[in-house]
């Protein structure tokens, strides 16, 4: 049986009914990951090696920059910059061609840089823990009647977490529980997306001068913002 260490925080996240429960867990996890990156984790040599190798994506680097601990960020950047400079290696043999006129791979750092532009220590950590959250959620669905009711009571799941949860569940659950989970998650999404579509339409037609004195409901007024969360 896979480790089921997240059952308590998952139950807590599913106790609340406000948007995607897995987004709530992810947001908390992201905050913890960045706090720890600037704190305890940066003192651990093994983790520091990982940070130097992976770097940080722009949103995460900006989020760290906005935090207080500028010395920690400076130290992290020093060794990251050394690593990145080291990856640049030798200049490419520009213009040199192989026997049949095809450009030979001269081992320059173009591909390495492309990988580096995409990689992020925090994204990688968050993503792997998110998968474990989904795996544990699927396991709770299969084994805990009370949890099934909590999941069915959620208002919606965002696109990312609905797909992640269903994918993991398809892999790990027996056919019956998986089909029931699929119906619960897809059913919630179908309903929520249909409602969102109606609210977005009400929002757009409110720009028509003929509707100038028709007030929008709260759900209609905030529909675009809700879309940014649901289509996350
Ligand atoms: Zn989500
Ligand atoms: Zn990132």
Image (cartoon, grey):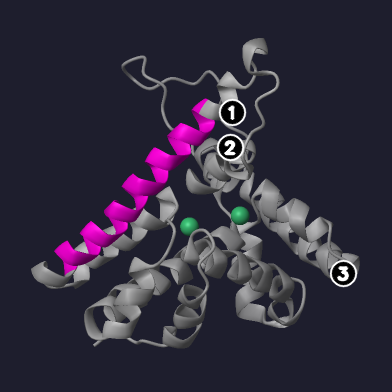
Q: What residue is shown with label 3? A: 69
Q: Indicate which disc, 2 or 1, sits on the residue closer to the N terminus.
A: 1
Q: Find out whether the residues at labels 2 and 1 contact each other: C-beta distance under 8 Å.
A: yes
Judge depth for marks 3 and 1 and give the one in front: 1
Between 193 and 26, which is closer to the camera in this rendering? 193
Quarter of the image where the N terminus is located: bottom left
Give the residue furthest to the left.
175
Write the start and end of the magenta stretch as one range. 178-201
Alpha carbon separation for disc pair 3 and 2: 40 Å
Q: Indicate which disc, 3 or 1, sits on the residue closer to the N terminus.
A: 3
Q: Element type at marker 3?
A: loop
Q: Element type at marker 1?
A: helix
10 Å crowding of disc 3: few (<14), some (14-19), many (20+): few
Q: What residue is shown with label 1? A: 203
Alpha carbon separation for disc pair 2 and 1: 6 Å
Q: Residue at x 28, y 79 (%)?
A: 139
Q: Tell me if residue 81 can be seen.
A: no
Between 130 and 102, which is closer to the camera in this rendering? 130
Q: Indicate which disc, 3 or 2, sits on the residue closer to the N terminus.
A: 3
Q: Residue at x 69, y 68 (%)?
A: 34
Q: Residue at x 44, y 59 (%)?
A: 155
10 Å crowding of disc 1: few (<14), some (14-19), many (20+): some
Alpha carbon separation for disc pair 3 and 1: 42 Å
The numbered disc on residue 220 is 2
């Amino acid at each position: 049986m896979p480790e089921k260490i997240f059952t308590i925080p998952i139950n807590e996240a599913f106790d609340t009914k406000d948007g995607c429960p897995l987004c709530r867990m992810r947001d908390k996890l992201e905050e913890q990951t960045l706090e720890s990156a600037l704190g305890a984790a940066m003192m651990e040599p093994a983790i520091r090696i990982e940070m130097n190798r992976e770097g940080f994506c722009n949103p995460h680097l900006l989020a760290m920059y906005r935090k207080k601990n500028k010395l920690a960020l400076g130290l992290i950047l020093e060794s990251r910059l050394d690593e990145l400079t080291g990856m640049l290696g030798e200049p490419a043999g520009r213009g040199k061609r192989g026997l049949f006129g095809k450009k030979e791979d001269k081992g320059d750092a173009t591909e390495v840089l492309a990988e580096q532009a995409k990689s992020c220590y925090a994204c990688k950590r968050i993503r792997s823990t998110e998968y474990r959250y989904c795996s544990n959620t699927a396991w709770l669905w299969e084994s805990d009647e009370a949890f099934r009711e909590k999941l069915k009571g959620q208002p919606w799941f965002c696109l990312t977490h609905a797909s992640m949860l269903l994918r993991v569940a398809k892999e790990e659950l027996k056919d019956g529980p998986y089909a029931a989970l699929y119906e619960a998650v897809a059913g919630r999404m179908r309903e929520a997306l249909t409602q969102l579509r109606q609210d977005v339409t009400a929002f757009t037609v409110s720009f028509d001068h003929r509707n100038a004195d028709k007030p929008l409901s709260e759900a209609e007024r905030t529909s675009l913002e809700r879309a940014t969360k649901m289509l996350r």
